[in-house]
Amino acid sequence: MSVIFEPLTIRNKTLPNRFFSQAMEANDGENGGRPSERTVSRYIELAKGNWGGVSIEATSVTEHSLARVNGLIISRKNLDSMKRLVECFKKHNDSSCLLLQLTHSGEMSGPFSEVVTLSPDASPSRAARFLTSDDIEKIKDMFIQGALLAGEAGMDGIDFKMSHGYLCGEMLRPSNTREDKWGGSFENRTRFFKEAADGIRSGLRSRDFILGSRFSMNEGIRGGCGTAADDEIVEDLTEMLDVIRLMDGLDMDYVNVSAGVPALTGSITRPTEVTKNLVLNHLRYAKAVKDMITKEKRPLKVIGSAYSTFREDAPALMEEMLSKEYTDLCGFGRQSFADPLTPKKIAAGEKVNWCVLCSGCSKLMVAQLNDGCIVYNDYYKELNTKHKAPK
């Protein structure tokens, strides 16, 4: 049996294979961030695809700062609809690991909501409200509450989003030079994450609940994650590896390795046909993390990213990366839009609809429309045609 179909245990959950469906925002929530019928149908299709793990798209812990006008929100009033999403997923597939990605959009929030920033010296493209120390304390409590609600909803775990320029990723940057307890030193810049993770683990009803985080090893910006100082541009992964050591000390279970900031360095995060070779950074980062974890005998599992870029060559690359123990799971984002049945089809030797790297789904997302594959899905193809039509 191919290593890509070998099971993997994370905490006490055994995943059926090494395929991981990354969090992909589709901007189709309704009524204050509840999953719509379209949302539920998308995850049913992923359940039928038999992915080893599925991360539900970035779900905001607040209704005030949102990146997508129809993005999902985790709250007590939305709990029943989240429960229904989980129940529908598990009705079709109870073996896959279902995670909820928790986020706060920070500077990435849309103009239809409140844009906020950690830095009083930041110069975002539009006005942003500076977050006080008390504001950040309240947001930390929102993450804790969001994770506990995810547990109530029946999720297997959460993904604490610290990637792609969102608030918790911004917190980690050397350029976060706040003078209060949330900025400056490495200890202060990781305080939010540490206290939130401790609060989540201590408040959970079950020890089986899985905790992990997706973060950008290198954002490709001056003073960003993956640099050594607020005025540095050259890559230095020292601090990011220290974050992973911190995760292990916080009794977390996995790290989802990504890179870049889509709004600023999108070709790093989502390589296209033109920038395809940048995907090698993702493989290198995952290997660096896995090497450190293996050398130091840490139990964290590693999820690599950007496998959609390899299209029909992805299964062979998965085989290589897994066999060499450079990663534990292989993450697909755009491919899960192109063909949510990918793992099942590969296992059966059936034809797969491979992502063509057109970024059509991303363009719909930026336009604040429902987004998905404009090549293989007629609904999104029509949306894209209307969007491009002369006004």
Image: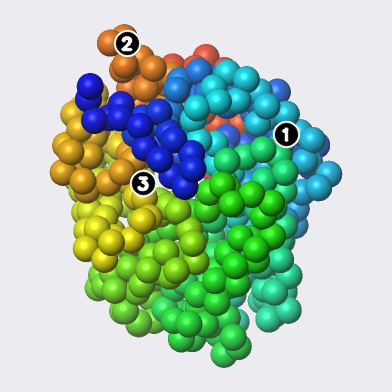
Numbered circle sitting on residue 333: none
Badge 2 element: helix
**Residue farthest toward the right in the current orientation of the protein:** 77
Which residue appears at 73% of the width and 29% of the height?
Answer: 84
Q: Position of residue 226 (x, y in %)?
A: 33, 69
Alpha carbons under labels 1 and 3: distance apart:
26 Å
- Which numbered disc, 1 or 3, marks the residue that appears first in the sequence? 1
On screen, residue 56 above or below 278 = above
Q: Residue at x 32, y 79 (%)?
A: 228
Residue at 69% over, 80% down:
132
Q: Are marks 1 and 2 in contact (CB under 8 Å)?
A: no
Left or right: 274 as drawn, with respect to 167: left
Q: Is residue 161 above or below residue 358?
A: below
Q: Are marks 1 and 3 in contact (CB under 8 Å)?
A: no
Type of amino acid at the residue the image marks with label 2: Ala
Q: Which residue is mark 2?
A: 348
**Image location of residue 278, percent across then percent down:** 23, 49
Q: Residue at x 35, y 32 (%)?
A: 7
- Residue that lies at the very extreme toward the bottom in this rendered image: 179
Cα separation, mark 3 vs mark 2, equals 24 Å
Please tell me how crowded label 2 is: few (under 14), some (14-19), or many (20+) other residues with Cα within 10 Å.
few
Residue position for label 3 = 303
N-terminal of the pair, mark 1 or mark 2, is 1
Q: Please say whether residue 67 is visible from this viewpoint.
A: no
